[in-house]
Structure formats: structure tokens, C-alpha cells
Amino acid sequence: MGVDLSLDKEKLESQDNLKNKVGLELPNIQEDIPPRKKLIFSGIQPSGTFTLGNYLGAIINWNKLQDDYNCIYCVVDMHAITVKQEPAKLRQNTLDAYALLLACGIDLERSILFIQSHVKTHAELSWILSCSTQYGELGRMTQFKDKSQKHADDINAGLFTYPILMAADILAYNADLVPVGIDQKQHLELARNVAERFNGRYGKTFTVPDPYIGEVGSKVMSLQEPTTKMSKSDKNANGFVLIIDDKDTIIRKFKRAVTDSESEIVFREGKDGINNLMTIYSAFTGQSFEQIVNDFNGKGYGDFKIAVGEVVADKLFPIREKYLQLVSDKEYLRECYTENAVKALNVSQRVLSKVYRKVGFVS
Ligand code: ATP
Ligand code: LTN
């Protein structure tokens, strides 16, 4: 695909300069240059098979954005090792994640999809950016606080500097927009601060990225504890639905979803379980909460839970089928991720070379 990183503005400015210098009327090239499509970058950890939360909070948006933007997506295996991983399992999870993203509709004709550790510029840029990141700002990251409590026996430096690597992922491509769930907003804020600090110190180098947070499904909650986010590392498997769960499993998990002691299907504060089910139903059917309330007026929670389960299972079925087919075709997968790593390297190397020049490294 043609991720066009040419700076249209620069071309136009040089046209103006030339005009001033020679005093000639040049043909107006402004009309010939199509506006550059904005660049999207996002990453997902291969820390297990993806959940409905990952799907609605991230992947669905990744998919839609391909229509209007140049998109670069990444399976962030280097981020995954900030918590203990079994090497063989990490390798398998990474390949599974890659196949699942393809099955979910990431289209290699239009987008780049690669594996983070295949592209060395991320680690290289991360070091440079760490010298423009303050210790104090890393300490304020809530994910670091949560994860260091959860993994108290291994509070390693990578867990602490994780957001710098994430900033490097994004800034290495001069991404304009970063689709993430709400939980990643703070990390993105840090990436913006680092970009602005670097630009302030060395001159304009990085695009300051904006978060892109979808309207529906930006925070899908656990089916068992609807006040906490649905997470693939939850110990209770009934709390999450996996994209590749089969229909019976999906319906069983929804049937067991924790709700409340009332019986009214309505979106209201305090009804976390029902609110979550309505959010999921709305995300999959496109129906408004009002429509859902009308349609299920007089029906019980049991009926609603089955309806949500069925809608989810039916939508996920083709993805599951495609995934099973792709994951067994190792040769095809290898071709895809190898080719895409080269593309990602080409784009990010250009940015990194500029950064090296700016900081004063001998070329
Ligand atoms: P883990 O359980 O290992 O912490 P996770 O399930 O939270 O992982 P990540 O790999 O950290 O998933 O996140 C991938 C993307 O999915 C991010 O953009 C994140 O914001 C989004 N995401 C994760 N969980 C949810 C959720 N429950 N609702 C909405 N978006 C989510
Ligand atoms: N930190 C993110 C994953 C991630 C990411 C990124 C997301 C790593 N690098 C760059 C967007 C852009 C997470 O844990 N979900």
C-alpha cells in the first residue's frame, strides 16, 4: 500500500520561496497535490486471545478507519514482556494475534500490519525519547501503578518505561491519530507531551498525535464484575467473551452475566451489568438505547441476555471461521508479516534518521 508521508506543506512552501527568488509566476501546483491522508497508528498486546472489549474498544475502529486513512497497526510483543511471559506461549500468542487481526478485517492492500520486534526503530527511538521523558511523569501512570500491584514480584524497569516505548511506536510514524480504548488515554497524553518537549528542544520533528476514541464500546465491562473493565487476563473466564469463543460458550457466558435485583431493561446509573449489556447490544446492532428499551419492554433479563449472546455470536462467527483458516496457514502468515515489517521499517527509518540528525549524532 502507499502510505504517503510526503510533506505537502513543505512542497508548497518551497514553491513560494522559488517564486519570491526568481520573481516568476509558476504554475500553481497546489491544485495538483491531493491532500495527504492522515496517518493512523495503533498497537495491541499479544497477551492472550482478544476479548469483546478489545474488539469493540479497538479492533472495530481499526477496521473502519482503513476507509479514510493510511493505517499502520502493530502486534506489540515487546510491550508484552513487561510482565512475565512463557517464551513459547508468547510466540504462539503473537502469531495468533496477527492472524486474528487479519480475520477481523485488517486489509494488507490498504494497511500495514506488523510485529513490533521485527522493526528495530521502535527500540532505538524509545531510547532517544526516554531522554525527553521525566521520571515523575512516568510515576503518575495509573497502568504502572495497577500493574506493579498486580505483579508485585517483578516491578521491572520496562514496566515503568512502557509508555516511552508506546510513544516511540506512535512517533516513529508521525501518526496523526491513535485509536485506543479510554484506558490508554493517559499514555497517549504522555506521548503528546514527549513529542512537544522534543519539538521544543530540537525543532519541529514529530507530529503531536491525537487520541481517537470510538463512541460505543470504548469501555466494555467484565460480565462477572461489571464495575471493572473486561480484560483478557481476568482469572475468571466467565468475565470475558473471546472473539473466537463458539456460539454455545458465548451464550452461556451471557446467560451467567451479573446484573441487578431489579427487572427493568434501562440504561441508568447503578445498573452496571445491564448498562454493559445494552452497550454491547447497541454496538453490535446499531440500535439506540431508546430502541432497545422499547423492544425489550416487558421482557425479563433472561430474554435480554440470550438476545445479546445471539447477536454477538452471530457477528463473531465469520471472524472465527476466517481465523481458524488463517492460523493454520503458517507460510502465508510468514509472508505477510515479513513483507509488512519491511514496509514499516522503511517508513520509520526515515523519521528516526531525522531524529538522529536533530539530536546531534554523527551521520
Ligand atoms: P490485559 O488484560 O493483558 O491488560 P487488555 O485486554 O486490557 O489486556 P490491551 O492489549 O491492553 O488489552 O488493549 C488493546 C486495546 O483494547 C487497547 O486499545 C485498549 O484500550 C482496548 N481495550 C482493552 N480492554 C478493553 C475494554 N474492556 N473495553 C474497551 N476497550 C478495551
Ligand atoms: N499500550 C497499549 C498497546 C500499545 C499501543 C501502542 C496502542 C502499544 N503501543 C501504540 C496504541 C499505540 C495497550 O496496552 N493497550
Image (cartoon, rainbow, N blue to C red):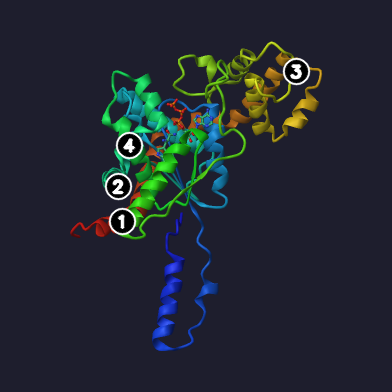
**According to the image, label 1 marks what residue?**
201
**According to the image, label 2 marks what residue?**
132
Tell me if label 1 and label 2 are in contact, CB under 8 Å.
Answer: yes
Q: Would you identify the image quadrant in which residue 63 lies?
A: top right
Residue 46 visible in the current orientation: no
Q: Which residue is at the far top?
A: 261
At 39% from the left and 85% from the top, the residue drawn is 21
Earlier-in-chain disc, 3 versus 4: 4
Classify mark 2: helix, strand or loop.
loop
At 58% from the left and 40% from the top, the residue drawn is 214
Alpha carbons under labels 1 and 3: distance apart: 57 Å
Viewport quadrant of the C terminus: bottom left
Alpha carbons under labels 2 and 3: distance apart: 52 Å
For this view, does 122 lie left or right of residue 75?
left
Percent position (x, y) of residue 108? 47, 47
Q: Is residue 151 above or below residue 180?
A: above
Residue type of the residue flagged with mark 1: Arg
Tell me if label 1 and label 3 are in contact, CB under 8 Å.
Answer: no
Residue type of the residue flagged with mark 2: Ser
Q: Would you identify the image quadrant in which residue 213 lies?
A: top right
Residue type of the residue flagged with mark 3: Glu
Ligand 2 is within 8 Å of the C-beta of the residue at disc 4:
no
Tell me if label 2 and label 3 are in contact, CB under 8 Å.
Answer: no
Q: Which mark is residue 136?
A: 4
Q: Nearer the viewer, mark 2 or mark 3?
A: 2
> Which class describes the residues within 10 Å of circle 4: few (<14), some (14-19), or many (20+)?
few
**According to the image, label 3 marks what residue?**
264
For this view, does 196 lie left or right of residue 228?
left
Residue type of the residue flagged with mark 4: Gly
